[in-house]
Image: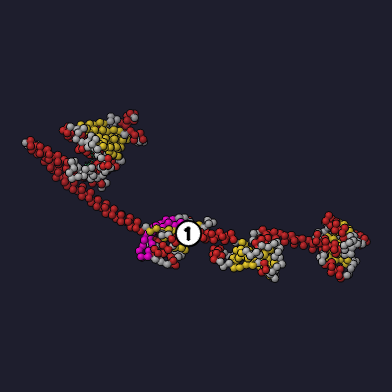
Amino acid sequence: MISNSKILIVEDDRTSADLLSRWLLLLGFEISGIFPKGEDALAAVEKAEPDLILMDIMLAGNIDGIETAMIVKEKFSVPVIFLTALSDESAIQRAKAAEPYGYLMKPFAKKDLQASIEIALYRRKMERQLIESEIWFRTTLSSIGDGVIATDNENKIRFTNSVFDKLGGFLPNECIGKKLEDVYETQHDTTTEGLLYQSLEFDPDSFDEPLQHKILVTKDNRQIPIEEKISSIKSADGKILGKVISLRDTTKRREAQLRALKAKDYYLKFFEEFPILIWRTNKRGESDYFNPTWLEFTGRNIESQLYNGWLDGIHPEDRERFNNAFAESLSKKEKFEIEFRLRSCDAEYHWLACVCNPFYDLENNFEGFIGLCFDIHNRIMLEEELTQSRDTFDAANKAKSTFISIMSHEIRTPLNGIACLIDLLAETKLNPEQSEYLEMIKQSSNTLLGLLNNLLNFSKLEEKKVVLEESKFNLRERVNEILLPYKTQAKRSGVKLNLNVDERIPELIIGDELKLQQIIFNLLSNSVKFTEKGSIDLSFEIDDSILSRSVKTDVIYLHIKVADTGIGIAREKLGMIFESFTQVDNSMTRKFSGSGLGLSIVKKLAELMKGRVWVESELGKGSVFHFVCEVKTERESLFDLTQLN
Ligand code: ADP
């Protein structure tokens, strides 16, 4: 183990040196040099790198063995064993200062030499290991970021790491050996900020021993907030050897926490002023804040509302719905919106619209929910009233329509009787005057019948009792039939009546024949009524623009135009003529009779047939009424039609 170690001999007695070197070689050591003088030995140590020096105390040169050993200890730290024949007590005392690794009293035996060398080398090895482990230990403790101080059992500092030295304003090793209380001065942090921070940091669920929050007073009297932890150092048999204090500078963390707290506080202040109801929960969903508006609204004190006490104020019918919505949002940490009733200070329940948003701290950790509640009671009440009055209105409207339709029926029956009797009377012998009166009676009864028909149609449309019925019919024939009575009338008044049917319109079309007839009839009778001279042009065209976009192949868009050179309609009245019971001239002395229902029936029929009606008109010049709707055709005829396009 220790053999092969290199040994340097410093001995001025040649015989002793020879014997020594022979023994050493026999024991398996190497000799790295033999010097009679101390100064020569010192010059050789650096180069020879011996593991041990055997040093005679009395030497021939300028310095003796003790002085030489002192220099070796200081400069090279090579262990030295003194060889001495002296029993001089004072020299031995002096030699102690060089801290030799042993003494060999001359004369000594070979085995004493061996034992001394082995003990010295072993001790040296142990010392090296100890130094290395201390270096390792120190480096580790200096790199952990926390300051560390270790004391012995008398509270004297044995160790401080560089973090502590820096934090406390000390030089390296400056604290070693000093009493802890002379170096490490701390105070309890009783400032408001400190207490706030401690409460923020306090974690009731933690199993660790709580850290002490203190203020470190440094050598140059700076005050630094720290977290401190103290542990005792115990020997294997449980004896207390000292203690270790680890401390962490919390300045930055504390600042960040307090900044976050201030930000929160800022919002709370903001909420205090807000005229809407605001509440907040912690991350477990328990309410921990209500603004003054809330307390004023509910008329309750804050204690009764905190920790979900407020839920008692929710209307029993809304409570479960609210709890379910909130529980779901809490589990997902998601926003939710809900309307519910809350008891107000007047003991009445008020409707509130509540928007709940999750909120987060500066480090993006979920903190809870903030709920904003708006009083929507008036709106809900108004809506309820509106629904009620709409129901009442609908009922009244329905009663009116029913009444009109019953009355129209009732009046129509005797009127039909009158019409029959007029016809019968016309066949009897009458003088010209009587015939003229009879003709006038006939016209009046026809007008009355037309009016009643319009009323009946309108009320049916209002009640949505009218359905579309499809049949195949000849449009040209039907139109000629409609025109027949007007032709004689036009002839008499001198107004020209022209008909133009696009030749592309097939002979037979499929649609609601009666409703189309009624539309043409209503538009045409208006034109006849409001035109005293000029012409009335009735035309039937195909709306190509719509056809070209249509994907249906058996459909055409029929465009009916009724153009007249009558009195025309003022621009500002155009928007109202399709309203029911509306006429441009509403005065009692109006020139033209009518109910104001004709165009509104056309409009309702257009809607029913998914068509469109509109008008172009100029006052004094005339009007053009347009009506477009979809009608079906037979396939063959449409084939021709597309060929034409
Ligand atoms: P009325 O039975 O009164 O004719 P309508 O609903 O058919 O009711 O027409 C409403 C009003 O629109 C008419 O009173 C008239 O003022 C105006 N009007 C309708 N057609 C024409 C037209 N061709 N020329 C001028 N005014 C018209």
Q: Quadrant of the N terminus?
A: bottom right
Q: Nearer the viewer, residue 207 or 509?
A: 207
Residue 638 at x, y percent in the picture: 32, 32
Magenta-span inclusion, residue 345: yes
Q: Nearer the viewer, residue 59 or 429?
A: 59
Please give the name of the residue rendered at 51% of the width and 60% of the height, measured from the top-left corner.
262
Residue 314 at x, y percent in the picture: 39, 62
Q: Nearer the viewer, residue 399 or 243?
A: 243
Residue 328 appears anywhere in the view? no
As drawn, is 246 to the left or to the right of 551?
A: right
Q: Secondary structure at mark 1?
A: helix
Quarter occupied by residue 414: top left
| Residue 309 vertical placement versus 555 (above, below) | below
Residue 410 at x, y percent in the picture: 17, 47
Furthest toward the right, the residue is 15
Q: Which residue is mark 1?
A: 267
Q: In the rendered structure, which segment of residues is drawn in magenta?
A: 336-359
Quarter occupied by residue 491: top left
Residue 35 appears anywhere in the view? yes
SS majority, magenta: strand
Type of residue at label 1?
A: Tyr
As drawn, is 459 to the left or to the right of 55?
A: left
Residue 489 at x, y percent in the picture: 17, 34
Please give the name of the residue rendered at 64% of the width and 67% of the height, measured from the top-left corner.
185
Quadrant of picture, ligand 1: top left
Quarter occupied by residue 422: top left
Label 1 environment density (alpha carbons within 10 Å; few <14, some 14–19, many ≥20)? few
Magenta-span inclusion, residue 468: no
